[in-house]
Image: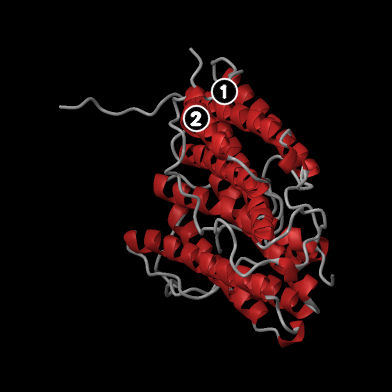
Amino acid sequence: MTAPTTAPPDTAGAQTAAAVENVLIATYAHLAALPYVQDLGLGAFFAQTVQHHNEHLTAFNAAAVRLGGKAQPGLDEALMASVVTPGLGKVASGIDAVMFSARLEMIAAATCTAQVATVADALLRASLAAVAGVECQHQGVLLVVASLLSAGATAVTAFPVAPARLPPTLQGPPVAFLRTDQARPPTEGVVH
Amino acid sequence: MTVSRRAFLLVAAAGAVAGCSGGSHPRASTTTTTSTTAPPGVPQPSGDVAVAARAAALENATAAAYASVLGLDRLGAVPAGLKGLWQTFESHHRDHATAWNAILTAAGEAAVTSGDAGFAGSVVAPGLAAVKDLGGAVAFVVGIERAMAATYLMAIDGTLTTAGALQTAAAIQPMEMQHAAMLELLAGTDPVPASFATTTGALALSSS
């Protein structure tokens, strides 16, 4: 006989979402310092994206505290160990960096989306859903940039992107549904 | 660019937009035409099932809007990359409709195979008529994607109660936002204008 499963407390979910945001903030800082990333012309986009993630972090930590838990100041160490550290080790070009960023955005979005139907707190649910969409916007921009780079562009400095520059096959490619199979477990970033 | 996002939203506001609070905003267009239309005296679906029916109809209408844009002769030759993007997004919306129809049929309801007539008549048709060039076409579908995303967020925030419907809406809403962002890169508007998604511009969730 197995014990009945129970959903983790909402504080754990909020802390895990915060821990994932911390990972993205740290990773963007690392990538932005790479010379071949600086050459891409994405400085303003990266800065705006990091600002978004900082605001997501603030929202999730506020939720954790409001729900009786502690704020999560640290990284999701399991995500760092299993994805980020080995992934960064393989980044060797601008397009590598962009695609790796897109992957992390998808993981962040999936982590939020996986919890939408499981958390009890309505405000936290609203925050998770509101953040997941923005992470997917980030990912969408990155997939277009990666597509341009794969088509021979060396930098993406001209906005709007002329439709004629868009290659017939997009990197990614974009999918119809946000899958949650790469979501981080909701207790992974819990603060004890 | 012929049709700005503001112009699109003004058209939408005159039509089917419910507003973010869901309480005091007018719902000028709440009529849908779907295959689930019941004869007098037969109860209409309610709750999550009603939202599923509405969502399927809106997705069908959105897919049809992409098909219409792809067929506009006045756009001239559409670059292959953009054409592929529109075709991909059209297929996504058909997939979304299929997902909602799975919820409907599991609940014993008929699948919704037609587009939402109110949305098509008040938003899609006038928006499509106003499209004069490629830039206008991109802005037109961006407006639809943003309205769809806002509608799903409103459903998640305050309407849906069952896990299956919540999961479906939560898996679709981010992709509508991604569609919009990718298109906004081509339109020249900010692809990620805010840190959090909002319900501004959401469509009414149920017909009445």
The residue tagged 1 is A75
Query: Contact (CB < 8 A) between labels 2 and 1?
Result: yes
The chain identifier of the residue carrying mark 2 reads A
Q: Quadrant of residue A7?
A: top left
For label 1, the SS is: loop
Q: What residue is rendered at 49% in x and 30% in y?
A: A79
Q: CA distance from mark 2 to mark 1?
A: 8 Å
The chain identifier of the residue carrying mark 1 reads A
Of A78 and B8, the residue lying toward us = A78
Q: What residue is rendered at 47% in x and 65% in y?
A: B95
Label 1 packing within 10 angstroms: few (<14), some (14-19), many (20+): some
For label 2, the SS is: helix
* Residue A124 appears left or right of A134: left
**Three-letter code for the amino acid on which mark 1 is drawn:** Leu
Q: Quadrant of residue A34?
A: top right
Q: Is residue A58 above or below residue B88?
A: above
